[in-house]
Amino acid sequence: MNKKSVRDVEVAGKRVFVRVDFNVPMENGAITDDTRIRETLPTIKYLIENGAKVILASHLGRPKGQVVESMRLTEAGVRLSQLLGKPVVKTDEAIGDSVKAAVAALQEGDVLLLENVRFYEGEEKNDPELAKAFAELADLFVNDAFGAAHRAHASTEGIAHHLPAVAGLLMEKELDVLGRALLKPERPFTAIVGGSKVKDKIDVINKMIEIADNIIIGGGLSYTFFKAQGHEIGQSLCDNSKLDLALEFIEKAKSLGKQFLLPVDIVITDEFSAKANTKIVEVDGIPADWEGIDIGPKTREIYANVIKDSKLVVWNGPMGVFEIEPFSHGTRAVAQACAETSAYTVIGGGDSAAAAEKFGLADKMDHISTGGGASLEFMEGKALPGVVALNDK
Ligand SMILES: Nc1ncnc2c1ncn2[C@@H]1O[C@H](COP(=O)(O)OP(=O)(O)O)[C@@H](O)[C@H]1O
Ligand SMILES: O=C(OP(=O)(O)O)[C@H](O)COP(=O)(O)O
């Protein structure tokens, strides 16, 4: 990484504004997955142990510049305090006199958590005044919010123009692992791209055709390719505006000598529910009133073998509607193959990470990114504003 990290600067006695991504899933006011909080502990502990005064800031949800009671960071503060085994002071605002007073009271090694930065309109607008107000609280800015690094917001990007700005340890790890995988991939390198929307995955498929050896396609986006090839796809998901592009991708892969794998058989259903009828058919066997919902058993085997023979696997997007048990077998098979292969396996956050977690296979992966959108943009080769703004080494 060519950016400075928290290890490259003096932190003792300093007030350090740490942007974290505590945007954790919540149900009825309780945190249902605290991975993002746990993944930030190395940075927070490093700062505590090195005598910094730690000021944490995060967003939660999309409150659109308003105070939304259910989107307060109170629960995140409670969980963090449990995980650290020490008190975490939580303010009800992210700027203003109450915050200034709380910061002034900090001793070395203390931890303060500010309120949701998205309660302020200026956050998502990257308002320079808000960025300045955040910066005035601290002597150093540490960005550890990889999950929000693709956002140019006041607490992720703007603030970096007013303070020395360095990466946290999670940010550093994410950039190192994803960067190493993409810049100097071990081969054969297999990219698995699934999920529902072709539109969201175009750039990543395009990039992977260029850098990977095998491109495995699954999930709802397969059907745009099938339709482009002239198959009947019934009620399956399809982006009709991307049919030409789908054919171009297949041609591009061929001309570059890449293996571009589409499902050879699929699970179809007559209804989007666990009780629906299902059938396994070849790709040209979808009746007009049925829909493709998962990859079939032959495809699972082919994909598992490719994964097994790879040295690097990067996976983004489920193979089917894994949330519903009868349609989860394809995603489970790919997750299992990723767990068993000797290849280095990287999961690009989002639903694939949730699937690996659901199947109890998460700890068998080499790296699960804490960022869905951020890891996608990184894999597409886009610059992440939250990273660009940090100081170079
Ligand atoms: N064949 C399919 N038909 C409809 N939806 C699908 C299909 N395959 C996968 N999905 C859905 O795609 C969603 C994930 O898509 P997406 O957001 O693109 O992935 P990710 O979050 O991993 O980037 C899941 O909710 C899954 O149920
Ligand atoms: O959860 C997040 O994104 P992700 O679901 O794409 O990983 C990040 O916290 C960014 O949130 P945002 O997409 O509301 O800017």
Image (cartoon, rainbow, N blue to C red):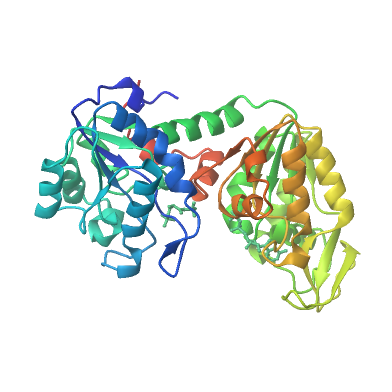
Residue 322 x, y percent position in the rendering = 70, 61
Front residue of this view, candidates 142 and 47: 47
Q: Report if residue 96 is visible in the image.
A: no
Residue 141, image x, y percentages: 26, 35
Task: Tell me: 25 left or right of 51.
Answer: right
Position of 138 with respect to 171 (left or right) is left
Q: Is residue 310 above or below residue 304?
A: above
Q: For the N terminus, give its image quadrant.
A: top left
374 left or right, relative to 336: left
Res. 345 image quadrant: top right
Q: Residue at x 75, y 30 (%)?
A: 342
Q: Position of residue 60 (x, y in %)?
A: 37, 58
**For the point 33% across and 65% down, which residue is it?**
63
Total numbered labels? 0
Left or right position of 166 against 42: left
- The residue positioned farthest toward the front in the image shown: 85
Q: Residue at x 36, y 42 (%)?
A: 85
Specify whether residue 95 is in view: yes
Residue nearer the viewer, 199 or 101: 101
Instruction: State which quarter of the image contains the C terminus.
Output: top left
Ligand 2 placement by image quarter: bottom left
Locate residue 211: give its quadrant: top right
Could you say where residue 212 lies in the image, as x and y percent from the top left? 69, 34
